Amino acid sequence: MIYQKRGETHFLQLKVGDEVMESLRSIARDEEIGAASITAIGAVSDPEIGYFNVSSKEYDRISLTGNFELVGLTGNIGWRDGEPLIHAHVVLGSPTGVHAGHLFRGTICVTGEFVITRHEGRLERRLDPEVNLPLWDLT
């Protein structure tokens, strides 16, 4: 993982073997990024994605095997219980089709180009018992 900071924006390049979510948590910790928006493109292998099941109030997870084009990632950085919480959704492409959902993990297999735009302050998340998810605390 290498990156450059330009103003309030971090340009992050992940290398082959870097795990996406851990790399994002690491830069959030190291650079003390309290709130940010994230976009990315690249390629990942063996990702795990999920879909929120409204009835069970839990994620249904799907592990994919192989290499996938990271057509797009959009997400944000917030904090919960003193740790960065990355919320990211992806669109993944392969010769057999397109997959999309919440990203739980993925390993870079070619490159990952991430743009992290820092926002003022710190965005905290609190568990919303109605939906059983840590949502933004905007109070």
Image (spheres, helix red, strand yellow):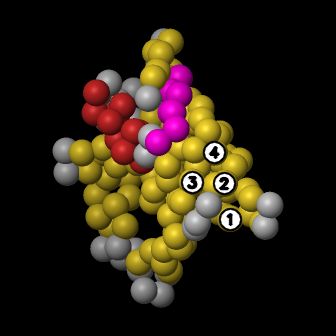
**Mark 1 = which residue?**
99
Q: Are marks 2 and 3 in contact (CB under 8 Å)?
A: yes
**Mark 4 = which residue?**
43
Bin the neighbour count of mark 1 within 10 Å (Cα to Cα): few under 14, some 14-19, many 20 and up.
some
Is any part of residue 34 visible from this angle? Answer: no
Mark 2: amino acid: Phe
Secondary structure of residue under mark 2: strand
Q: Which residues are magenta?
A: 11-17
Q: Is residue 109 left or right of residue 57?
A: right
Secondary structure of residue under mark 3: strand
**Mark 3 = which residue?**
45
State yes or no: residue 22 in magenta.
Answer: no
**Mark 2 = which residue?**
68
Q: Are marks 1 and 2 in contact (CB under 8 Å)?
A: yes
Q: Residue at x 58, y 49 (%)?
A: 44
Q: Residue at x 78, y 66 (%)?
A: 97
Q: Residue at x 36, y 31 (%)?
A: 27
Q: Are marks 2 and 4 in contact (CB under 8 Å)?
A: yes
Distance of mark 1 from mark 4, alpha carbons? 13 Å
